[in-house]
Image (spheres, rainbow, N blue to C red):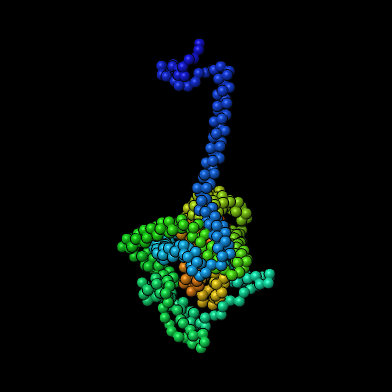
Amino acid sequence: MSYTRSSMRTESGSISSSPPPFTSGPISKLEVEEEKSVEDGNVGLRDRNACVKFLANNWFMLATIGGVCLGFGLGFIVRTTQPGTTAITWIAMPSDIYLRLLQLTILPLISSNILVAFATLDFKKDGKVGIIGILYIFALNLICAVIGAVCALLIQPGSRVLVGNTNESAPLSTASGLTASDVFRDLFYNLFPDNIFGITIFHFQTEVDTSTNKTVANSFKSGTNMVGVLFCSIIFGAAAKVSGEVARTFIDFFKALSAIVTKIMSVFLLVTPVAVCFMIASSVVGRRNIESDFVQLGLFVVTVLTALAIHFIMIILVFFISSRKNPLRLLKCSGPAYILAFATTSPALALPEAYMGLDKYGVRQSVSRLLCPLAATLKGDGPAAFIAASVIFVAQNSRIELNIGQIFTILILTFTSSLATPNIPSASIVLIVTILSSIGVPTEGAGLLFAMEWLMDRCRSGSGALSILFLTATAETIYDKIKKRKNAGETEFFTEPDENSTSPV
């Protein structure tokens, strides 16, 4: 029997296109070679697809790094020509427009996010474990803001200059003449505004004549009163929460506003690589002591990493003290979530891995599915440490001495704004620019932060992912202990007397 057609009739009478059961030797060898070439081609295609996938997933990071490198190169080249003020102004123009666009979106974004967050919190539904988790989130955000500020004040990364080939602290500008009473009065007046529309464009500030050290006027200065905006957002959100169904349209409006503004900001952030290029170039051209800037950036990275390391040690100690369990086991389960958050710069995208890690560790799904989304939305401990350290770094770099009132304002704004940090790359830079404007520090110095933002963003995102897992496990442990003590007390109260007891009848 010979097969002369590629198809054959089966027993049922249908036509089958399968190959014949046997072939001659030369044909088999040819087919093997073809199959081998196809496999080699598939391997090459897979390699190319993996490369394309990597570039597609990390194009923003690579483009930003390229913008930083190109900005340094362009800045050093233009620097040799000794450009004038007009040339420097036009070099900085794209970056200034970029910062203005971000400042345009940050006010509605923060106010809408905080309002919706407080309006949608359901303490009855979330239960005691949810309350424990939320309180822990608030505490972490505040403590990390303090840690970042303290590290920046102790290390002083922005006040270092190279003088005579030695690293010395540069003298900062003198104070503005404001007393502690003036500073805290301004803070409270801004915290409790009298005009809900005025807080978007003005803030209260006391002016002092430094020559006579006397108060000249109590006036309003141009600039957003972010403390007042946050206060109003919290008040309106809490009021909408207790108003019930009648406030549903009000809450939906701010939900839509948050989604729209987030989309607009995401589009604006697409031009970050180009803006960073001109931002770095203008900073390099306008600097007199460029060597000191590199020293300051290095110390700034050390400052932020030190703050994140202290934060990491703190959450491990809290977990160990509350549970008396080995934290290394949970840390092992946290590896995939950390890697994914580090790669994507978003702890929210690492939630599936966080769920799997907590399930593997043994945390109840009812707890992990409740606290992980809350933590991903409200928790900004890593960004809080970075923002506080960055604001103080820029102030030091600008030769501005911060008083106790300004530092207190930085902590308040950092804590509250970290609760509304959007899950988009480099969102913390936008908050930094806003806080700088609120305390009267020039925002141009924030351009140096972009030089290392690609690394800092990943470090704090990975730290945030680890914190989500440890926070969830810690909250469950604390809740179980409280519940166990309560049940033990009720059991002891209702325990029947022992049959062998000699108590009187």
The residue at the point 43 percent across, 69 percent down is 230
Q: Position of residue 342 (x, y in %)?
A: 55, 54
Numbered marks: total: 0
Horizontal and vertical percent position of residue 255: 38, 59
Q: Is residue 213 visible?
A: yes
Whether residue 499 sits left or right of residue 162 in the image: it is left
Q: Is residue 280 left or right of residue 227?
A: right
Q: Which residue lies furthest to the bottom in this view?
A: 212
Q: Would you say 447 lies left or right of 306 here?
A: left
Looking at the image, is 403 positioned above or below residue 473? below
The image quarter in which residue 216 lies: bottom left
Task: Look at 49% across and 20% down and name the residue there.
Answer: 19
View extreme (top): residue: 1
**Outermost residue toward the right in this view:** 165
Residue drawn at x 50%, y 57% is 273
The residue lying toward the viewer, choosing from 355 and 487, is 355
Instruction: Please tell me which residue is depicted at 55% across the width and 63% down the height of the picture.
Output: 78
The extreme front residue here reads 81
Q: Nearer the viewer, residue 436 or 12?
A: 436
Residue 150 in sight from this viewpoint = no
